[in-house]
Image (tube, grey):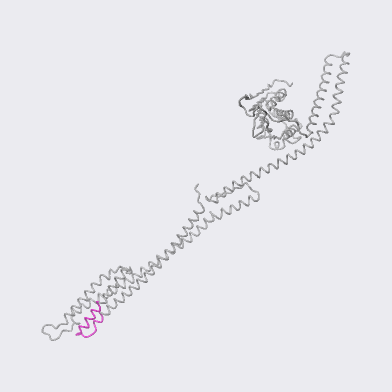
């Protein structure tokens, strides 16, 4: 989307304001110019009217005086012609200045006719001043028809000239009134335009400037109060929208950091609680193992002594062989279970010892395959498949027995959680300096509340209803002692589970952490399919 920058919007507003001011100024200047022109035209036309009136007055004087005074009469006619010349000069000046409404059309038409009339009058008077043939003195010329007609014609021309000037003055007034009306319309339109422009600019400044700034302020306040899930939405198409987008990106990063810190705090809190429980369980395990070892030792010693005595007795006894075999088998079972209990108590004692365990570089591929060979004989493996896919010969500094117990526990839990024809996929690879073991099963899955407490001691949601809730807890402690991590994931009940174990790597000489390296063949996948007809070993 094309960005409309703030400077572009401000320039648009400035252009519109300048246009409004220019329109107002133009209307005002036009009105002033029209008023000035009207005043000047009226002033010049009044001067023409004064001269035209003088011509009429000079012609009116011709009716006065004695009939025999031809010199005075002719002098007055000459004066009228001089005044007419002055009027002609004034008219030319006004036309040159553009101050004549009709460009002097009427005046230029009447002035030659008036001049001709005055010339005719002058000729008639000059002719009449000579005595007629057979008369001793000239006849009174004012009463002659020719002079009278010429005089009246000149007077009519002078009046028409005066009325022409008056018409020009009236026309100038009409034009001035029309110009004033036009000026009023222009100024009125400019005022309405300016008011509409101000209202429009206030609206758009509110949309373009005030509302986005207010929204930015509200967004900052929301972030200040810890609300990160309400992004700023601005559609101004300018720098403020870019600022809002950058602010949203910053808030998203801040939210991610905040959420990560909260997650770390929760994780550390759970680890602290788990550590406290581990200490308590360790003390309990040590006490229980110590108290149980003595009775177990007595049971084992007595069962062995009883077995020896029973052999002596049975040697002289007449009891059926079947009964003898049953007694012997039961004693063997007592001894085996006592030894198993002793092994369990020994593990509890090992678990209670918090000292550093011995770690040596071990091939994780071989370690996992060894565990899978043991799992082959478990009853829970019937009708199920285990697929192991290593991506290389990977060596890590581990306590082999402890890590075997972790792998065994995860595999057994996966097999217990699956129905017949279920599959467990195990992958081994490296990522970021860690060996990564991933166990993906098609079992019963886990709910979110189970995932949250899966590594807590004595917590169990086993599908079979068995278990003490210590297996994953101990596995978590072992992995933690190795400097690694163990995580569980599941999309929900019935969707299977995924456990990921990460152990820090140590590359041994001649052993690679990636498949396909020259000199080392890629390990082949291991697929174990357990038939359902097999009985427990």
Side of 346 relative to 187 (left or right): right
Side of 16 relative to 325 (left or right): left
Rendered image quadrant of residue 397: top right
Magenta-colored span: 59-81
* 132 shown above or below 532: below
Side of 337 relative to 508 (left or right): right
* Residue placed most toward the observer, 399 or 492: 399
Residue at the far left in the pictured view: 134
Rendered image quadrant of residue 517: top right
Side of 111 relative to 244 (left or right): left
Per the image, is 4 magenta?
A: no
Per the image, is 67 magenta?
A: yes
Q: Position of residue 462 (x, y in %)?
A: 72, 31
Q: Quadrant of the C terminus?
A: top right
Q: Residue at the spot x=82%, y=31% of the render?
A: 289
Main secondary structure found in the magenta portion = helix
Residue at the far front in the pictured view: 509
Q: Position of residue 408 (x, y in %)?
A: 72, 28
Q: Position of residue 220 (x, y in %)?
A: 62, 51
Q: Position of residue 184 (x, y in %)?
A: 42, 66
């Amino acid at each position: 989307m094309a960005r409309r920058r703030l400077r572009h919007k401000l320039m648009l507003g400035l252009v519109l304001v300048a246009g409004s001011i220019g329109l107002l100024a133009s209307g005002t200047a036009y009105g002033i110019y029209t008023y000035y022109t009207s005043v000047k035209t009226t002033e010049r036309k009044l001067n023409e009217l004064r001269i035209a009136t003088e011509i009429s007055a000079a012609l009116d004087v011709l009716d006065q005086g004695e009939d025999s005074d031809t010199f005075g009469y002719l002098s007055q006619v000459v004066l009228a012609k001089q005044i007419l010349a002055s009027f002609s000069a004034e008219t030319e000046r006004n036309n040159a200045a553009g101050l004549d409404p009709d460009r002097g059309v009427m005046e230029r038409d009447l002035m030659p006719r008036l001049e001709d009339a005055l010339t005719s009058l002058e000729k008639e008077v000059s002719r009449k001043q000579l005595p007629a043939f057979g008369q001793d003195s000239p006849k009174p010329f004012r009463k002659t028809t020719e002079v009278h007609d010429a005089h009246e014609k000149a007077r009519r021309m002078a009046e028409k000239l005066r009325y022409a000037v008056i018409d020009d003055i009236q026309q100038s007034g009409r034009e001035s009134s029309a110009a004033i009306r036009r000026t009023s319309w222009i100024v009125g339109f400019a005022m309405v335009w300016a008011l509409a422009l101000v209202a429009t600019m206030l609206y758009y400044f509110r949309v373009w400037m005030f509302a986005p700034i207010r929204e930015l302020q509200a967004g900052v306040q929301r972030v200040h109060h810890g609300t990160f899930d309400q992004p700023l939405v601005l559609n101004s198409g300018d720098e403020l929208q870019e600022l809002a987008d950058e602010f949203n990106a910053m808030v998203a990063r801040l939210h991610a950091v905040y959420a990560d810190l909260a997650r770390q705090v929760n994780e550390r809190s759970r680890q602290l609680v788990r550590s406290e429980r581990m200490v308590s369980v360790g003390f309990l395990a040590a006490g229980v193992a110590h108290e149980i070892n003595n009775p177990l030792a007595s049971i084992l010693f007595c069962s062995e002594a009883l077995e020896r005595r029973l052999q002596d007795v049975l040697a002289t006894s007449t009891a059926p062989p079947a009964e003898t075999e049953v007694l012997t088998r039961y004693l063997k079972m007592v001894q085996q279970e006592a030894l198993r209990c002793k092994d369990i108590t020994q593990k509890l004692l090992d678990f209670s010892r918090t000292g550093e365990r011995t770690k040596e570089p071990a091939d994780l591929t071989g370690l996992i395959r060894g565990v899978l060979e043991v799992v082959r004989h478990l009853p829970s493996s019937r009708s199920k498949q285990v697929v192991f896919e290593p991506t290389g010969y990977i060596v890590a500094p581990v306590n082999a027995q402890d890590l075997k117990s972790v792998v065994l526990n995860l595999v057994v839990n996966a097999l217990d959680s699956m129905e017949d024809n279920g599959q467990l996929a195990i992958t081994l690879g490296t990522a970021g300096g860690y060996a990564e073991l991933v166990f993906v099963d098609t079992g019963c899955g886990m709910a979110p509340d189970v995932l949250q407490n899966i590594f807590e001691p004595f917590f169990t949601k086993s599908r079979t209803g068995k278990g003490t809730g210590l297996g994953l807890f101990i596995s978590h402690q072992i992995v933690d002692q190795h400097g690694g991590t163990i995580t569980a994931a599941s999309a929900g009940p019935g969707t299977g589970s995924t456990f990921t174990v990460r152990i820090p790597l140590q590359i041994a000489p001649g052993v690679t952490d990636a498949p396909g390296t020259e000199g080392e063949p890629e390990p082949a996948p291991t697929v174990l399919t357990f038939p359902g007809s097999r009985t427990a070993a």
